[in-house]
Image (tube, rainbow, N blue to C red):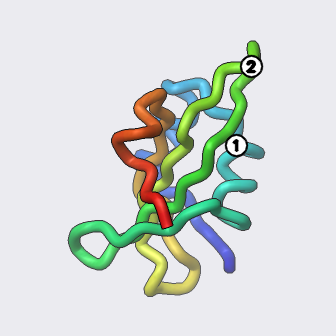
Amino acid sequence: MKFRLSKHALEELGRRDIPRDLLEQVLQNPQQILPERGGKKIYQSQVEFGGGKIFLLRAIVKDEIEPAVVITVYRTSKIEKYWRQP
């Protein structure tokens, strides 16, 4: 699937110091895809950001259009809060 980054998502990558290649990995091969309000989806994976610390990298995506649009992206250490067990 092809993705386009919104202006906001591009700003958040820089502001939150998230490498674009990590985001690309999550978008192409997410560990989980969860439903979100308004027909959006959350693509998320547990990612190591250096120093051995694991974060949850989450991208809010509108994927019913082509190309899919990444609305925003962020990382969080609150994995237990957002991770869904199968």
From the viewer's side, name the closer residue of 65 and 54: 54
In the depicted structure, whether residue 53 falls above or below residue 82? above
In the depicted structure, whether residue 54 falls above or below residue 1? above
Look at 45% across and 65% down and name the residue there.
61
Of mark 2 and mark 1, the one earlier in the sequence is: 1
* Residue 2: % across, % down: 67, 75
- Inspect the image, locate mark 1, and give the three-letter code of the amino acid beneath it: Arg
How far apart marks 2 and 1 lie (CA) works out to 19 Å
Q: How many marks?
A: 2
Q: Quadrant of residue 21?
A: top right
* Residue 53: % across, % down: 66, 21
Mark 1 surroundings: few (<14), some (14-19) or many (≥20) residues within 10 A: few
| SS type, badge 2 | loop
From the viewer's side, name the closer residue of 15 and 55: 55
Q: Which residue is mark 1?
A: 20
Look at 43% across and 58% down and name the residue there.
84
Look at 22% across and 69% down and name the residue there.
37
* Residue 81: % across, % down: 34, 41
Q: Is residue 74 left or right of residue 2?
A: left
Q: Which residue is mark 2?
A: 52
